[in-house]
Image (cartoon, helix red, strand yellow):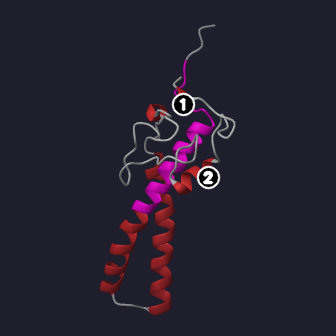
Amino acid sequence: MSEAAKPSPEMPPRGVSPLYAGVMVKCPRCGKGSLLHTFLNLRDQCSVCGLNYKFVDTGDGPAVFAIFILGFLVLGGALWVEFKFEPQLWVHAVLWGVVTPILAIGLLRLLKATLIALQFYHRAEEGRLSED
């Protein structure tokens, strides 16, 4: 382990709260370094503590959660707008055509960071068969 990667008294071995790391999109160990280098692309390692992000395997988890959450929010919002204001069809197309992708990207970023932080916190990794 390199000097930068060794846990210190102010950096607990399990890292910061997964909720904090997820919402702030920060390193799950130190809570200071940025987790993503573009909007949804993961860095190779933390720029502050040196944590290597090769353990990360969120798979389709963030997308699946985002689909369920977005479906609930957008359908509920569309029904509310329809029954409250009774707009023309083109208003729905414009409103939800803009709102849905914005919510989707924001949710994907939040959910990806949160799942990475939870994976680090719980030391989740690929299953292995026992040699016993």
Specify whether 13 is left or right of 71. right
Say if the magenta span includes residue 34.
Answer: no
Q: Which mark lies nearer to you, 2 or 1?
A: 1
Residues 88 and 20: in front is 20
Residue type for callout 2: Leu
> For the residue marked with disc 1, what is the amino acid?
Ala
Task: Calculate the distance from the C-alpha at mark 2 to the C-alpha at mark 1.
Answer: 22 Å
Quadrant position of residue 42: top left
| Residue density around tag 1, few if under 14, some if 14–19, many if 20 or more, within 10 Å | some
Residue at the spot 43% in from the left edge and 45% down from the top edge: 60
Q: Quadrant of the C terminus?
A: top right
Q: Looking at the image, which residue is at 53% across and 46% down?
A: 115
As drawn, the label of residue 114 is none
Residue 19 marker: 2
Query: Where's residue 49, x and y in %?
Result: 52, 37
Callouts 2 and 1 close, C-beta under 8 Å: no
Q: Which residues are magenta?
A: 105-128
Q: Residue furthest front?
A: 3
Q: Callout 1: helix, strand or loop?
A: helix
